[in-house]
Image (cartoon, rainbow, N blue to C red):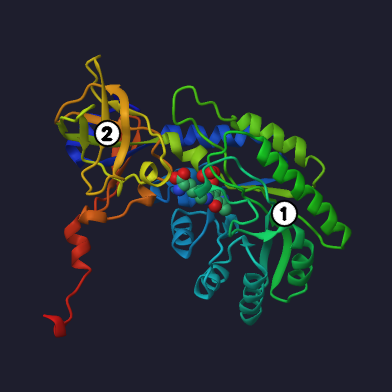
């Protein structure tokens, strides 16, 4: 198995395992296909959802593709800026922006704040006015639409913490639009992630369109609408989520009379299938029913199976053609550290290499150092060359940041 033209065993030998491996060509292809899907949208900004993969080199690839960034913290904003993204092409979402973060983003001159509550909007207005600035803003709307995805990654239902209820949007918009310090020029929505169906997205966009008409009727100038991210990707063979072209056609149809600049915040659809997590089998342990294939990657490196019961394809790097049924587990001391139970997969033995697929989004970015395992390394491949784009941070380096106070020693 190769990543582009680089044999995965070469990377495992030189960098060690576990390691995330990303393909530049795939990132570029996904960025292009998503952009081309939106060819019928005349005025747009595509802002990559940095949370899905904040690696600086990944951001650099997307910056070169003309992408901006959707950020949810100052840490992400600094990454986008460091990757060369123009401040005007950065959108700041998130329900808990602190005063320090708002101030830093105002200083950086970012393109848009997506305000998630009346309280946040008033605070932002006060801070911006105090700095003699006018912040470009949109109000994030909670459209009360069921995205039909996993509960933990659904964001547009009335009881989710995101945005303001659509029923109160007109009133809150009016109040915030009157504040010095903010230029409220649009609305934003994001209903959830890994959506396998366009219907909930369309329902949310239709509601948003009605709101735009209402707000204009009330005398507000609406020039920007942020449609968020959410497009799903196939994790298993046979899964067939809507393509960027189908998504783009729906968006173009629903928004054709809006006369605004549309902002998109794709994450997973760009990065998900551009990366794998390369791992080595530590040993195979006999089980009552199926054997346990114990790999050197764990839930601290790839949290999605433990957190969401998510499925990741699992294949041998050098398959010998035979198959086995196995429980795929990591070394961490809890049962949640299980990638798959009773999985039909390539036959594997101790020392063999394998990959978890579709790990380019919400993979390394969600890593932790649980069980004092350190932070996983990341590699970017480009044709026949590759580079370590994030060093492995070993457990020792993490321990070095800790101290025992004198009064305890
Ligand atoms: N915009 C906003 C405001 C978001 O909250 C998100 C994702 C996105 C855009 C990007 O959504 P995407 O295009 O990637 O679906 N850790 C979870 C996913 C959490 C998504 C959170 N928000 C997972 O591993 O499935």
Establish whether ligand 1 lies closer than 8 Å to the Cβ of label 2: no
Mark 1 secondary-structure assignment: strand
Residue placed under numbered mark 1 in the picture: 224
- Badge 2 is on which residue? 328
**Marks 1,2: beta carbons within 8 A:** no
Is 234 in front, or is 336?
336
Residue sitting at the far left: 409
Question: Residue 349 versus residue 157: which sits nearer the camera?
Answer: 157
Closest to the observer, 360 or 131: 360
Q: Quadrant of residue 105?
A: bottom right
249 w.r.t. 370: above or below:
above
- The residue shown at (65%, 29%) is 246
What number is the disc on residue 391? Answer: none
In which quadrant will I find the C terminus? Answer: bottom left
Secondary-structure class at tag 2: strand
Percent position (x, y) of residue 241? 56, 30
From the top left corner, tell me how far across and down residue 86 is, in percent: 55, 56
Give above or below for 170 relative to 251: below
Count how many numbered circles sit on residues in the image.
2
Which residue is most to the top? 321
From the image, state whether disc 1 or disc 2 is nearer to you: 2
Determine whether, in the image, residue 24 is placed left or right of residue 296: right
- Neighbour tally class for label 1: few under 14, some 14-19, many 20 plus, Cα within 10 Å: many
Q: Spatial distance from mark 1 to mark 2, Cα to Cα? A: 46 Å
Q: Residue at x 74, y 61 (%)?
A: 185
Using the image as rendered, state which of residue 101 and residue 338 is in the foreground: 338
Instruction: Tell me the quarter of the image containing the N terminus.
Output: top left
The x, y position of residue 289, in whole percent, is 23, 27
């Amino acid at each position: 198995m190769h990543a582009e033209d680089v044999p995965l065993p070469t990377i495992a030998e030189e960098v060690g395992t576990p390691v995330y491996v990303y393909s530049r060509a795939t990132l570029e292809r996904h960025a292009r296909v998503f952009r081309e899907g939106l060819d019928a949208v005349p005025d747009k900004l595509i802002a990559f959802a940095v949370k899905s993969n904040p690696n600086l080199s990944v951001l650099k690839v997307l910056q070169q593709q003309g992408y901006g960034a959707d950020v949810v913290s100052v840490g992400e904003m600094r990454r986008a800026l460091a990757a060369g993204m123009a401040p005007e092409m950065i959108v700041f979402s998130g329900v808990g922006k602190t005063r320090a973060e708002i101030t830093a983003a105002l200083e950086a001159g970012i393109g848009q704040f997506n305000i998630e509550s009346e309280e946040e909007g008033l605070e932002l207005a006060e801070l911006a006015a105090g700095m003699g600035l006018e912040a470009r803003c949109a109000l994030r709307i909670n459209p009360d639409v069921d995205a039909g995805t996993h509960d933990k990654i659904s964001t547009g239902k009335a009881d989710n913490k995101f945005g303001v209820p659509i029923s109160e949007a007109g009133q809150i918009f009016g109040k915030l639009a009157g504040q010095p310090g903010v230029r409220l020029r649009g609305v934003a929505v994001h209903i959830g992630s890994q959506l396998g169906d366009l219907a909930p997205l369309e329902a949310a966009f239709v509601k948003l369109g009605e709101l735009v008409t209402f707000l204009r009727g009330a005398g507000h100038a609406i020039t920007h609408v942020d449609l968020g991210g959410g497009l799903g990707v196939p994790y298993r063979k046979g899964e067939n989520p809507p393509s960027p072209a189908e998504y783009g056609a729906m968006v173009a149809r629903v928004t054709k009379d809006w006369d605004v600049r549309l902002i998109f915040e794709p994450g997973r659809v760009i990065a998900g299938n551009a990366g794998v997590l390369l791992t080595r089998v530590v040993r195979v342990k006999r089980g009552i029913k199926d054997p346990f294939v114990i790999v050197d990657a764990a839930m601290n490196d790839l949290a999605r199976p433990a957190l969401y019961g998510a499925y990741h394809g699992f294949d041998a790097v050098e398959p010998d053609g035979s198959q086995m049924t196995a429980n795929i587990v990591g070394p961490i001391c809890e049962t949640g550290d299980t990638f798959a139970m009773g999985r039909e997969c390539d036959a594997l033995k101790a020392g063999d290499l394998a990959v978890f697929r579709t790990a380019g989004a919400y993979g390394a970015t969600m890593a932790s150092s649980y069980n004092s395992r350190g932070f996983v390394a990341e590699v970017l491949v480009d044709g026949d060359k590759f580079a370590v784009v994030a060093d492995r941070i070993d457990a020792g380096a993490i321990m070095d940041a800790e101290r025992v106070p004198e009064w305890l020693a």
